[in-house]
């Protein structure tokens, strides 16, 4: 997230707004005062975190709440593993906050720049067929509703609302605290290696089941998949992290520095994209290491891009992927960013992309200076033909009528929204589109 003068814009430069007012509350009570003031003035009000959503979900044309000053640990219970954090806490700070208690988050996405409230509210997930997204780790939350009151939702209070509040799109109120069910700190043994794409697709179900966490990347114009598999091992296991120099070469130089230059050059001369993609799969993705969970699950990404991701029934991933591969070849597009494939367990969060079904995710990207429209819209049609649900924080074109067909509890969520925010103080154009006005 950045602000230039009075204009806010997201990381992907796909959304921006000039809010009427910007506030930086330091406490939950500060949020409460801001909400009451906005409601009294009949203004909309929204909180923003790191601005890593590509959609307009965080756009705040009225009052914009920056929660950067609301970070840190509220409480931690070593016995239960439950930890409460202020809503603005960035994911990359959480491992350090949990370390004194011997705890870790059960799973993470591959980027850790987001705030915890933004990550759960948009359905951020990692990979692993036995593990849900970040919202599935939420066992409690406190939000400020449109009445200006605190609403606590947990195992003892308003429990029936948890599946809605834990992944609420920012439509139900302003989150001020989030309680997570954590697990004992653990080590991951990671193996990154290239493999023939056709073989990976033919054996995908086995590969997903054989590892705690499995994903693969495919650079278009190549016949190689870059596979990543990770296995949980006891915390006493000796760590063998990537050498500092090797990690810098792989992540900072090759994956970010050189890659940024090539992506930029590819906008002028698309012909260089296929040979670079073939070179990229030779230079990266072949390594083994053992390290703390958060150091394995997350990575640094500084090349700016835009993304669309769809969740599919897990059994539909391979046919959908093959259709996308054929699409790129048929259209003759020069696609510089890899396609990412991940997996997640089903969960019970009403608006989770994995609600009620084991899911696989296919994500497509374009460099931020490239126009993604034709590519994304064509891929979106394939995803919809295979039962896809779009990631709430990533680009898509769907509206409430189509989304209602995909979510059995959609109308229950909308009814709760009507109850908690009847005058739509927490709305914006994106929420009006995906939830209805």
Image (spheres, helix red, strand yellow):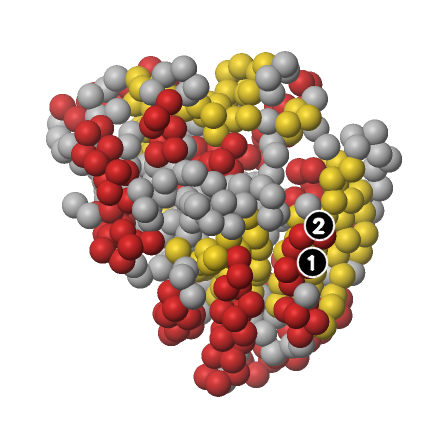
Element under disc 2: loop
Where residue 239 appears, as percent x and y from the top left, is 83, 37
Residue 211's label in the rendered image is: 2
Q: Residue at x 70, y 22 (%)?
A: 102
Quarter of the picture holding the N terminus: top left
Where residue 119 appears, as percent x and y from the top left, is 46, 39
Spatial CA span between label 2 and label 1:
7 Å
Disc 2 to disc 1: CB gap under 8 Å: yes
Q: Residue at x 29, y 55 (%)?
A: 405
Q: Which residue is mark 1?
A: 207
- Residue 146, quarter of the rendered image: top left
Location of residue 171 with respect to 185 vertically, above or below:
below
Where residue 218 appears, as percent x and y from the top left, is 62, 68
Whether residue 338 is visible here, answered yes or no, is yes
Left or right relative to 382: residue 345: right
Q: Residue at x 80, y 56 (%)?
A: 287
Location of residue 350 with respect to 254 vertically, above or below:
above
Q: Residue furthest right?
A: 238
The residue closer to the viewer here, 45 or 189, is: 189
- Residue 120, quarter of the rendered image: top left
Element under disc 1: helix
Left or right relative to 421: residue 186: right
The residue closer to the viewer here, 27 or 339, is: 339
């Amino acid at each position: 997230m950045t602000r230039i003068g009075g204009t806010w814009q997201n990381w992907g430069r796909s959304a921006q707004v000039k809010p009427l007012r910007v506030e930086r509350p330091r406490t939950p009570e500060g949020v409460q005062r801001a909400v009451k003031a906005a409601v009294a003035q009949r203004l909309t009000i929204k909180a923003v975190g790191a601005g890593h959503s590509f959609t307009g979900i965080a756009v705040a044309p009225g009052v914009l709440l920056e929660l950067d000053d609301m970070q840190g640990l509220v409480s931690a219970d070593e016995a239960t593993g439950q930890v409460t954090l202020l809503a603005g806490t960035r994911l990359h700070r959480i491992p350090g906050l949990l370390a004194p208690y011997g705890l870790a988050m059960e799973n993470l996405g591959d980027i850790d720049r987001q705030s915890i409230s933004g990550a759960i509210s948009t359905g951020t997930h990692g990979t692993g067929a036995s593990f849900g997204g970040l919202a599935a780790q939420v066992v409690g939350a406190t939000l400020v509703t449109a009445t200006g009151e605190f609403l606590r939702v947990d195992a003892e209070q308003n429990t029936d609302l948890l599946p809605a509040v834990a992944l609420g799109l920012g439509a139900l109120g302003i989150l001020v605290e989030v309680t997570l069910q954590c697990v004992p700190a653990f080590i991951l043994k990671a193996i990154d290696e290239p493999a023939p794409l056709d073989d990976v697709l033919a054996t995908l179900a086995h590969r997903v089941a054989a590892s705690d966490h499995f994903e693969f990347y495919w650079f278009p114009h190549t016949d190689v998949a870059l596979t990543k598999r990770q296995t949980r091992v006891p915390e006493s296991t000796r760590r063998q992290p990537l050498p500092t120099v090797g990690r810098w070469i792989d992540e900072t130089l090759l994956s970010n520095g050189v890659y940024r230059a090539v992506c930029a050059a590819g906008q002028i001369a698309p012909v260089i994209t296929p040979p670079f993609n073939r070179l990229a799969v030779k230079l990266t993705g072949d390594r083994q290491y053992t390290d703390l969970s958060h150091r394995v699950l997350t990575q640094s990404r500084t090349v700016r891009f835009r993304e669309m991701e769809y969740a599919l029934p897990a059994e539909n991933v391979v046919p959908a992927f093959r259709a996308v591969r054929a699409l790129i070849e048929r259209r003759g597009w020069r696609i510089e960013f890899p396609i990412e494939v991940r997996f997640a367990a089903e969960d019970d969060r009403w608006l989770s992309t994995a609600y009620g079904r084991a899911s696989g995710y296919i994500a497509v990207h374009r460099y931020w200076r490239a126009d993604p429209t034709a590519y994304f819209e064509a891929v979106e049609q394939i995803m919809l033909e295979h039962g896809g649900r779009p990631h709430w924080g990533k680009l898509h074109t769907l509206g409430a009528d189509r989304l209602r067909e995909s979510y059995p509890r959609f109308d229950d969520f909308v009814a709760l929204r009507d109850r908690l925010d009847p005058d739509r103080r927490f709305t914006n154009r994106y929420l009006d589109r995906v939830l209805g006005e």
